[in-house]
């Protein structure tokens, strides 16, 4: 099935990454939702970058702004109520936020593509799956029905759907959850995008299927040198696949590090709390360390560090003024905490 | 979901052969319909009436406009005219057969017109929301507040049809009234269906994969929002046929020499005629009732087939 990859990349992208392979450069992104109850600041200055072949995991609880970040990058925020108030999303050196909608649409799909959490609801129930995959080729590449359908079959085989040729005319509800997610992946990679954003791709799946889907994503990324942004709340899912991790809390990145560093020795109390709250077999019988309290209401984010009400390191300095900035706390790692060095020194409970 | 569909989804992927053609909402509805006797009864009736409207000479060779006063009010008989003859000695059977064309064309064209207008308005209102929605909603409410028949009577009374106008002009005039007063019904349904479908993930996904707004509306939102509209449109068909008959009965719908069940019923209801020639009233009324009934039955069956909760 390698011929698909060659075939598609032969078409050639119009956009070329920088010489160092920099694909995406998100700087100080801010998004707010203007609702009847007030302004919810969903993202408050998110900065990260993504290189070719790199996997960045964005980790956070529900409401931490990870999905909104993805939607803002894709330009599919529901607006109103959502507005990008400042910042830049540079793709191959061009700020996508400044592009007119018509041009931006040409980026979605062929350049940056996305898969969703619940593949059943992300596939149109009234059309056969093959038709939906083939639509990508028909609309973006101007292929005819027969050729595009053939491509769809190839892609379905590539994402390991058994009996792809027979099932190309089946409808989404006739597939299992894992198969549907594979179809969604096939659609997303159809045009060989440079960046794939996966928004909780395995949350709706069984654990065994989760591993297969993650493996598939990793293989595809390897094969196509895609940049992969993996949005998840599951620390277990990212450990194997991601190179870098950005931990989000209340619309901010609170810690960013290579995956190994972060797991071995977190620099932010929130990350530490997350790692310690994973149930472990070797600590059976001991009380599970949960993070107390609730994530903040985005309509009223507490002053100072937004994590301070739940943080056991919190001092007066954390409760007032500006939130701590994301600073370098070690080799190639950043954390937004006044006491990052203390947290680092303490280490995670082993 | 029907039993067959459950079985199929349980079947292991590897065993799914080419016979396991996919089944959409539409296909599932069709399978459901196939097992309903009511659907078949109404479908057969409708096919007969449609044939009548298209090819009346298949059913009769008698000229429905040929009048012979010597035979006026002849009783039905197997040797002469089986439905009898009317006040002016015209063959009632032939007139009833030829009357199907006017009634059905009003019904079908009226439904088409209301559905097209209502669908477009509903799609626009539901998809764009905001002020577009408000304007279209208020506009719809204005027309919605006028009762169908009263509005029809007023309109046709104000702009009467000349007797010489060809049938199609007369029909289109009635269709215009029906469309004008009937579209908000469909538009409301469509709007709410679109608003239900719009936040669905597959609409988001289509955007994320670079689909144009026009494509999102036509290929992702509309097909998923169409089911309730189809059901109501089918029922409306019967209602519009009845409305045409009512308007013609009142003498302001189709004008003689155009033949329609409504105007024949009107003729038959003349003073003393009901007792003198009840067959004049009976046969057009019977055919009218059967047609309306067939379409309403079909609408019912289609509604049940599309609503998974009723399966």
Image (cartoon, rainbow, N blue to C red):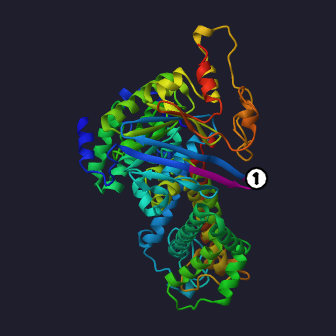
The secondary structure that most of the magenta stretch takes on is: strand
Asked whether residue A130 appears in the rendered view, the answer is no
A308 or B134, nearer to the observer:
A308
**Residue at horizontal 70 percent and vertical 84 percent from the top:** B154
A217 or A303, nearer to the observer:
A303
Task: State the quadrant of the C terminus of chain B.
Answer: top right
In this picture, is B15 found above or below B129?
above
Secondary structure type for disc 1: loop
Which residue was labeled with disc 1? A37
Instruction: Give the x, y percent position of residue A323.
Output: 67, 41
A146 or A297, nearer to the observer:
A297
Residue A49 vs residue A345: left or right?
A: left
In the image, residue B106 lies in the stretch drawn in magenta: no
Instruction: Give the x, y percent position of residue B253.
Output: 62, 82
Using a 10 Å C-alpha cutoff, classify the residue at mark 1 as few (fewer than 14 neighbours), some (14 to 19) or many (20 or more): few
- Give the chain letter at badge 1: A
**Residue at horizontal 52 percent and vertical 26 percent from the top:** A262
Instruction: Give the x, y percent position of residue A198.
Output: 47, 39
In this picture, is B263 found above or below A25?
below
Q: Hey, which quadrant is residue A36 in on the image?
A: bottom right
In this picture, is B295 found above or below A58?
below
Asked whether residue A66 appears in the rendered view, the answer is yes
A282 or A257, nearer to the observer:
A257
Tally of numbered tags:
1
Task: State the quadrant of the N terminus of chain B.
Answer: top right
Magenta-drawn segment: A29-38
Residue B78 vs residue A35: left or right?
A: left
Instruction: Give the x, y percent position of residue B30.
Output: 49, 47
In the image, residue A35 lies in the stretch drawn in magenta: yes
């Amino acid at each position: 099935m390698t011929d698909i990859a060659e075939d598609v990349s032969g078409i050639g992208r119009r956009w070329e990454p920088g010489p160092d392979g920099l694909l995406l450069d998100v700087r100080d992104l801010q998004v707010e939702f203007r609702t009847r109850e007030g302004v919810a600041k969903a993202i408050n200055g998110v900065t990260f970058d993504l290189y070719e072949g790199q996997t960045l995991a964005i980790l956070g609880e529900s409401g931490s702004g990870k999905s909104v970040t993805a939607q803002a990058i894709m330009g599919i925020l529901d607006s109103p109520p959502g507005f990008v108030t400042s910042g830049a999303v540079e793709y191959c050196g061009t700020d996508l936020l400044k592009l007119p909608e018509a041009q931006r649409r040409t980026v979605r799909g062929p350049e940056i593509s996305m898969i969703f959490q619940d593949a059943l609801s992300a596939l149109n129930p009234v059309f056969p799956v093959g038709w939906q995959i083939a639509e990508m080729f028909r609309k973006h590449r101007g292929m005819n029905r027969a050729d595009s359908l053939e491509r769809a079959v190839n892609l379905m085989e590539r994402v390991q759907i058994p009996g792809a040729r027979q099932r190309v005319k089946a409808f989404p509800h006739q597939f299992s959850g894992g198969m549907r997610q594979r179809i969604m992946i096939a659609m997303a990679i159809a045009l060989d995008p440079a960046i794939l954003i996966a928004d909780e791709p395995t949350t709706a799946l069984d654990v065994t299927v989760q591993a297969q889907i993650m493996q598939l994503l990793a293989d595809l990324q390897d094969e196509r040198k895609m940049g992969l942004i993996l949005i998840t709340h599951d620390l277990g899912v990212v450990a194997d696949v991601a190179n870098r991790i950005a931990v989000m809390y209340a619309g901010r990145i609170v810690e960013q590090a290579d995956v190994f560093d972060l797991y071995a020795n977190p620099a932010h109390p929130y990350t530490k709390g997350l790692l310690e709250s994973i149930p472990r077999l070797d600590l059976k019988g001991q009380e599970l360390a949960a993070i107390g309290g609730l994530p903040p209401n985005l309509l009223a984010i507490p002053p100072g560090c937004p994590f301070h009400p739940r943080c056991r390191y919190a001092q007066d300095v954390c409760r007032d003024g500006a939130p701590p900035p994301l600073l370098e706390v070690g080799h190639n790692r950043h954390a937004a905490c006044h006491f990052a060095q203390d947290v680092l020194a303490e280490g995670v409970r082993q | 979901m029907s039993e067959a569909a459950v079985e199929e989804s349980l079947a292991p992927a590897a065993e799914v052969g080419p016979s396991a053609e996919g089944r959409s909402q539409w296909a599932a509805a069709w399978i459901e319909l196939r097992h309903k006797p009511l659907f078949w009864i109404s479908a057969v009736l409708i096919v007969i009436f449609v044939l009548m409207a298209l090819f009346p000479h298949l059913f009769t060779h008698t000229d429905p406009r040929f009048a012979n006063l010597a035979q006026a009010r002849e009783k039905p008989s197997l040797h002469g005219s089986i439905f009898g003859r009317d006040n002016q000695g015209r063959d009632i059977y032939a007139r009833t057969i030829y009357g199907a064309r006017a009634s059905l064309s009003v019904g079908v064209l009226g439904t088409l017109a209301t559905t097209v207008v209502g669908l477009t308005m509903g799609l626009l209102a539901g998809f764009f929301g905001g002020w577009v929605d408000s304007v279209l909603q208020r506009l719809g409410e204005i027309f919605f507040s006028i009762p169908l028949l009263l509005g029809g009577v007023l309109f046709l009374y104000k702009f009467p049809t000349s007797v010489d106008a060809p049938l199609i002009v007369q029909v289109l005039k009635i269709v215009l009234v029906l469309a004008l007063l009937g579209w908000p019904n469909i538009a409301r349904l469509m709007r709410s269906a679109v608003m239900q479908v719009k936040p669905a993930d597959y609409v988001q996904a289509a955007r994320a994969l670079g689909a144009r707004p026009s494509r999102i509306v036509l290929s992702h939102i509309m097909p998923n929002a169409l089911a309730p509209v189809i059901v109501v449109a089918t029922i409306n068909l019967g209602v519009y046929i009845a409305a045409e008959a009512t308007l013609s009965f009142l003498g302001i719908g189709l004008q003689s020499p155009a033949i329609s069940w409504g105007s024949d019923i009107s003729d038959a209801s003349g003073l003393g005629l009901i007792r003198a020639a009840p067959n004049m009233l009976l046969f057009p009324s019977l055919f009218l009732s059967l047609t309306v009934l067939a379409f309403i039955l079909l609408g019912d069956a289609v509604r049940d087939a599309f609503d998974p909760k009723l399966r």
